[in-house]
Each structure stands twice: as C-alpha cells, then as structure tokens.
Amino acid sequence: MAESPIRFGVLGCADIARKVSRAINLAPNATLYAVASRSLDKASAFAAANGFPPGSKVYGSYEALLDDPNVDAVYVPLPTSLHVKWAVLVAQKKKHLLLEKPVALNAAEFDKIIEACESNGVQLMDGTMWMHHPRTAKMAEFLSDAGRFGQLKSNDIRVKPDLDALGSLGDAGWYCIRGILWAANFELPKTVIASRDPVLNQAGVLLSCGASLYWEDGKVATFHCSFLSNLTMDITAIGTKGSLHVHDFVIPYKEKEVSFSASSESGFDDLVTCWVLEPSKHIVSTDLPQEALMVREFAGLVGGIKFESLKPEKKWPTISRKTQLVLDAVKASIEKGFEPVHINE
Amino acid sequence: MAESPIRFGVLGCADIARKVSRAINLAPNATLYAVASRSLDKASAFAAANGFPPGSKVYGSYEALLDDPNVDAVYVPLPTSLHVKWAVLVAQKKKHLLLEKPVALNAAEFDKIIEACESNGVQLMDGTMWMHHPRTAKMAEFLSDAGRFGQLKSNDIRVKPDLDALGSLGDAGWYCIRGILWAANFELPKTVIASRDPVLNQAGVLLSCGASLYWEDGKVATFHCSFLSNLTMDITAIGTKGSLHVHDFVIPYKEKEVSFSASSESGFDDLVTCWVLEPSKHIVSTDLPQEALMVREFAGLVGGIKFESLKPEKKWPTISRKTQLVLDAVKASIEKGFEPVHINE
C-alpha cells in the first residue's frame, strides 16, 4: 500500500492503552498520532512512555482530541459506563472507532453507538484481540470441518482473569460469551440460564458467575468466569466427531508461537486399555502479536473507507452486538433468580 | 509376600471382563481361577481366550462358581440391574467382591450390598480403575497443596465415552461424578441441579445429560456426559491459586506413561501480552496398567483379611456409596424438571 498509515488518537491513559499503543506502533498500516487525558501532564507522560513518535499531539481534554482533523481513528479504553457518551461523539466527529469491551452497559446503549457509527459512515470494531490471532482461524477451520469435528455438541469456556491485570468482570464474561458465540459460528442461543452460584462483593459487583446457553438444535455451552480463582482461559469444544482444547485463548502463553489440541474420531484399543489416536498438537506462529493484528485489520478497513470509498464492514459491530445481547441475558437471568431468559435478536 | 495369590472368579463374560482378566493376570498377588457363564461353552471359550492358567475352573452357572470353596474373590461385571442379587449372594458365600460400576441402580440397592459385605466380613471395591493409577495420587497431591493450588473453586468434568466400548450412560455419569468427588476430597455436595438439556432415545434411555453440584463453601462443579459426541475424558479443576488439566483421566492415552498439566500463581507480563509462567507438564510412569493396580490393591486388602485377620477397608465402599448418592440426585433432578435436589448422607 502506498497509502499513508491510519492516524490513531487514544482517549485516556488506561492500563490497557499501553498494550494497544504498542500494537498501533507494531501494525504496519497504523500510527500513533495523539493521546488525550483530562490531565495534560498525564497525557504527556503517557506519550513519552509509550513510543509516540515525534510530532505526536497530547491533549488535556477528550474533546480537543476529537476536534483534531488529522485524527482518523480513535481507540476508546474508557470505563464502560462512559462508552455510550464518548463513542457516539467519536462517530459524530467522523472518526473511526476502536472500542474496548464490553462495548456498553447493555445492548440498548450499544445500539446507540452502532446507529451513530452507521449514520456517520465510520468503522466500528471492539477490542477483542484473540479473534485476530491466526490460531483462531486455524481452530475455526477445525471446528467447521464436518469430517474431523462434525457438529458442535457442547462447549465449555472458563475465563478467570487476574483482577488487577484485566479489570472488570464484564471483561471476563465478555470473553467467555465471545468464545461461545465464535464456536457456534455466531448463531445466537435460544435460551440463557445463569448458574446458581454467583458471588457478589459488598458493593454488589459480580466476582464470579456463569451460565448455560441452549440452542434450538441441542447444542449447549456453559461458561464460568471468576476473580476468585487462578488465571484460566480455556475453551473445550466438543463435536460429534472431534474435540478441541485450548488453555490460553484470550492471552496466549507466548507472543510468537501458540498451540491448540485437536482430536478426531477418538477411540480405544481392543481391550480399552489405551487410546488408538492421541490428540494432535497444532502450533501456530505469528510475527505480530494478536493486538497488532487487530489494529492492522481495523486500520485496513478504515483505509478502505478513507482511500477507496468502501463502506464500513458490518461483521464486527454485529459480533459485538450479539455478545452484548447474551451478556444482557445472563444478567437478566441472575436478576430473575436463575430463570431461563429467551434471546430475541 | 510368601502368601499365595488371591484366587479370582469372574461372573459372566462381559466385554470388560476381558480387560479385568488380563489385569488379574498382571497383578502379582492375584490369579485367575474360575469363570462362570450361563453357557458352559461360552465360559470355556472365555477362559481359553483370556489367559486362564491350566487347572482353572469353568462353570455353566453363576451359583456353581460361588459354591467353589477355592474362590477367594469374585469380579462381577454383570448388567447393573443384576448387581444387587448377585453381589449379595457373593458376600453371603463369603467371597470378596470386586463390583463393576455403577454399583447398583440406586443407593438403597447399594446399601443392601454394603450390608451383606459388612455382615459377612468381606472386602468390597468398585471397578473404577483410574483411581488406582499413580497419576491420580500425583494429581491429588497438587490439588491438596494449599501453596500451589489453594482451595478448589470449580471443577468441570466431561466424559463422552465411545458407546460400544464403554457400555451404558451409567458408566459415563459414574466417572464424571467420581471425578468431581475425588477433586472435592469426597465431600458430598449440598445441592445438585441437572442441566436442562438431557437427550433421551426412543426407549427413554439417557444419551446425554449433565448437572451442576454446589457445596456449602461456594465450590461448584459441573459435568456433562454424552454418547452423541467425540470421546472426551477431561477434568478441569480450578483453585484459588492453581489449575489442573487432564484430558484422559478415565482411560489413559498410553498404558505406561501419562501426563497432566498444572499451573500455579499464573499471571501475565507487564503489558499483558503473554503469560509469565506456562503450565507445567507432569509425566507419570507405571509398569502395571491402572486396572492391574486396582486388582493388586483389592487383592492386597483381601490377603490382609485372609492371611492376617484384618478387617475389610471401609474407604472403598464409602466412596462408591457417595458416588451413587450423587448419581441418584442427578436422576431425581431430571425427573423433577431440573429442580435443585438436596443430598442427605
């Protein structure tokens, strides 16, 4: 591409913004251009510490960054409760929007963000990085292989983040639900039932929860996310003919080389004393970390709109919205005393 | 030991009896002595095909085997519905009892078997082989390590047997529940709630089911067992400080060398781009397959009673009974429309 890189503005200096700033630097079609904080000193310190190139802008208010006509796209890592306000403003200023997950407090709020992006012709993508790792495509290949995996029957996702590192429970639940929808080819479940063991802290914040999701065709998925346990990031997807296991789907063990395990047509020897075929380990390498691949994908879509007059890609906001719809249903089931909640798209 | 090996009688020629006959041959303190079938020809063919030594007895009726005074212990692989009748008779004939799982149709039936064994002073053990693999003790060491694993918070077990190889759903559910109780140090859960997605065939037999189990202290376990999916034998136990993964807990991938994966105090690097410590893989070797270790353990207990006037070991029947109690509760919850069922010991 002879086109110039997409210029990113970063809204706020959240911890996660350090990782994404590095990713913007690493992505070949993106560049760090501006950062805003409510404190100019904080913004300057952030720019200095995170590899912002000479000539970058630092702003003491979010509005000032949004008014900079050289900003193509804005990364929003603000607290979830502030998303609807700032994401809508980003779109109204005709900036493309890379929005941290969970995208909003509920689907109704997120619909306002989608509407603002659509009416202003800007690209919207949420910050779920693992979707962009090349391993994810390899695993999806296996899951969609009727001969090796068959039809998905059950899927169990466990995400137990480190509290300090990953922030809110919304994150953990978001990852669980995204992993479930991903394995189900983004078909929404019919019914959601929360597990009966949520743990809340004294402020009423969920520290641990889970749910089972049921599809029309008999597929079932369960997830559990908790701050009270050791770090865990598992997907166990089981099909009629094969199984997939991965234990680091959200943040890979290693940046450049990861693996997953796949079994197919598993069975025993004659006396049932051992397996005939052991699962195979599949190794996937990547030069760029998944967060840089996410930025590259997003910047590529933005470049298409900016330089080639393409339309925004609807796939990403649609996936975000489905994730949010299921998240809402889990919350509703907890509030209704673990009753089944039906999902209407 | 100068003591002579324990002489086993095998009641019936079920498929699984081939594996256990081999195990009796492999165990240094046990010997194959007799086999009975309702057909004498079938018993003779079984003895010839399964390494029964010269001088072994073949019987055309179960009663005849039980009347042989040289039989020390009887292995019972009959269909579950016949267990209570034959297991009680075995005990009344003062034979020690190695009983296939599930041990009975329900806990009330199993209590009759326990009572018969206790009043006749014979050893009772069920045929759950994986309990006897040295890996299981190594994994239990990790789970009980407060520094490395902490307190168990959640446990997910999936067992999806090959229908032909492993027989009935009772088997799969039995293994799931045993795995859950094992990780919970055999403390019974307070409440059991079946999952809302059981699949029954036209004859009303469960092809797929699952449940969540809840303990007083907030521990939760889920299991799923199904004939409709690829073979799976997973335990995912997550504690406050560590996690354990094993993917072949019922039947090991290989007979002589197996592994499990353990993580402890997992965490990320500063930018949350990768893990600081990857899980460690623990390899456990064994000369004897787990089923022979089971027979050796059982024959050792029988030898203690026979040669040293020791009392039968209550640990094994107690574990069997707890497993059966939970199995009963899962069935009750399914029958009550997925209502919570409380367990009283």
Image (cartoon, coloured by chain):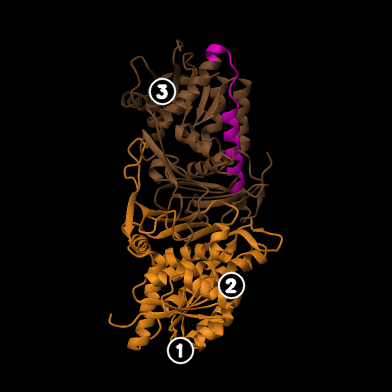
Chain colours: A orange, B brown
What residue span does the magenta drawing correspond to?
Answer: B306-330
| Residue B23 image-quadrant placement | top left
- Residue A179, compared with residue A296, is above or below; it is above
Magenta-span inclusion, residue B307: yes
Residue A69 image label: 1
- The reply to whether residue B248 is in sight is yes
Q: How many marks?
A: 3
Mark 1 against mark 3, which lies toward the viewer? Answer: 1
Dot 3: element: loop
Residue A90 drawn at (x, y percent)? 51, 84
Q: Is residue B289 left or right of residue B85?
A: left
Residue type at tag 3: Ala
Identify residue for label 3: B27
Instruction: Tell me which label, 2 or 1, sits earlier in the chain.
Output: 1
Mark toward the viewer: 2 or 1 = 1
Give the residue displayed 55% in from the left and 18% down from the top: B94
